[in-house]
Image (cartoon, grey):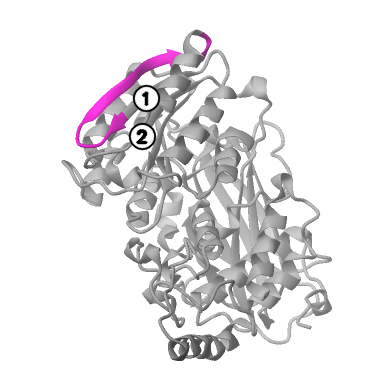
Amino acid sequence: MQVFAAKGLYSRNKNRNEMKIKSLFSLLLCLGAVACSVGAYDSFSLPGDAYVTNKDAGMMGEVPPSGGDSFDTIVENPFVKVADAPSSSFSVDADGAAYAYMRSCLNSGYLPGRHSVRIEEYLNYFTFDYADPAGEETLAINAEVGPCPWKPEHLLLRLGLKGKSLQESEIPAANYILLVDVSGSMSGVDRIELLKTGLVNMVEYMRPQDRVAIITYSGSVKKLLESTLVSEGKADIQNAIKALYASGATAGGEAMKMAYEEAAEHYIEGGNNRIVMCTDGDFNVGVSSTEALVEMVESYQDKGIYLSIMGFGRGNYQDSRMENLSSHGNGTYTYIDSEEEMMKVFVQERSHFCTVANDTKCQVRFNAETVDSYRLIGYENRVMSSEEFEDSKKDAGEIGAGQTVTALYELIMKEGLSDSFSVGAFEARYKLSLKDEESRSLTQTLASGDVLTDNFNFASAVAAFGLTLLDSEYKGEASIGLAYDLAKTAVGFDPGGYRAGFLRLLEAAKK
């Protein structure tokens, strides 16, 4: 177990909205607004003429093209007294959509709205350097404790999980149903054209034994391609994808029902049976309410069919709907903002589509003699009761092959502790299959210790950035500068170069 390090380890040392400034006076007013705003960001400003952000971001500026995007309200987890609740439980969330959405906003010259900032998805966008499971387990856990960079008098607990890595030959055959939104709102190079490029590339890397069906939906639902073996119709699959175009209204509910029926008809026992839904989430024909769609998805939970959602576009983006559907559909949720992201999701990390840990949930039991209070950072909509954690029938999150999940707790300790002490115990529960009746359990003790890893520093950096964007009441000394100083010490392990990409985002903010 890796823990405690010296505090000296931490250094404290458009689509832009096409702003048309009609006079020198208005330009000076705009620049003055920026000058008044930058103090909260360590005197760093985002690229562009001024701060431009959603109305709920709490910064100066006009509403960007994402102003019509829909997000659930984030109410941060508070500090909880161990004396009142000695344990904390939550379902894992392996999604990364919020991070990619944030990057799209920054690259367009404005800040994301605060309710789009889900810190758990910022963390889980990245792969961490965690050890693979041992023996028959398909999940491994780890943890470390150290000083909290943005609140030095507090401690930070990092929890890590990793799904078993699989060789290409070990990955089961896939039964993919590509459920593609071809309504008018999906028109554009950043939507349907980007989607087509990514799906064609994905098929290029699929194996002969894999199957693909394509269902499209706009004003009506159409089975564009029957389930086809890659070995028998690779060119047919790719040509069908290339022919996609967007127009009309959006009948998403009916299309989803057809996709599940198609997945069931060609179900592969022991295979990766998965609907890959590509949309901006704007369903406006037929079954369209989030509640009705969630009910439909839940009715297929025990069928062994997974739902992955790929989100596209800004301006009318229905994040709250897609995040809800994926979490109830035993799947993952990703936001696609570039061809690079398409390659990450569909090619470089395609093994994540193969789930190795189902209904995965975590619980920390804190030592009341050493820990006064704790706060779970992020995971606001994944919090569970102790009863739900112990209930093997309770739905929870999935982890793919080689995929990592990270969670952070901020801790307020009791006074008078020695250099070495117990913090508590960490338990994770998961199932090998969606059809399993009982969960498997992994446990680890939590205690103070020695030098911290790069995993701790990088997770701290990502969280500090998220707290800053949230303008969190718990952010303490968190800033873009602190996030940058932490992150630049922890880029040694960087498959895909995504940590380096995070540094570039922070550098843009500093300039």
Residue 394 in sight in this render:
no
Q: For residue 440, which quarter of the picture?
A: top right
Q: Residues within 10 Å of mark 2 (few under 14, many from 20)?
A: many
Tell which of 157 and 326 is nearer to you. 326
Q: Main secondary structure of the magenta part?
A: strand
Residue beneath the point at 25% across and 44% down: 293
Q: How many marks?
A: 2
Residue 122 is covered by the magenta coloring: no
Quadrant, the N terminus: bottom right
Q: Residue furthest front?
A: 23
Residue beneath the point at 71% across and 40% down: 132
Q: Position of residue 365 (x, y in %)?
A: 57, 63
Q: Which residue is mark 1?
A: 214
Q: Residues within 10 Å of mark 1 (few under 14, many from 20)?
A: many
Residue 433 in sight in this render:
yes
Q: Residue furthest left?
A: 286
Q: Position of residue 357 (x, y in %)?
A: 54, 38
Direction from residue 128 to residue 320 in the image, left or right: left
Q: For residue 506, which quarter of the picture?
A: bottom right
Q: Residue furthest top?
A: 232
As displayed, is residue 50 above or below residue 28?
above
As displayed, is residue 312 above or below residue 386?
above
Give the residues drawn in magenta, as a range. 216-231
Mark 2 and mark 1 lie on one chain; the one further toward the N terminus is: 2
Tell which of 360 and 349 is nearer to you. 349
Q: Which residue is mark 2?
A: 180
Q: Position of residue 371 (x, y in %)?
A: 62, 76
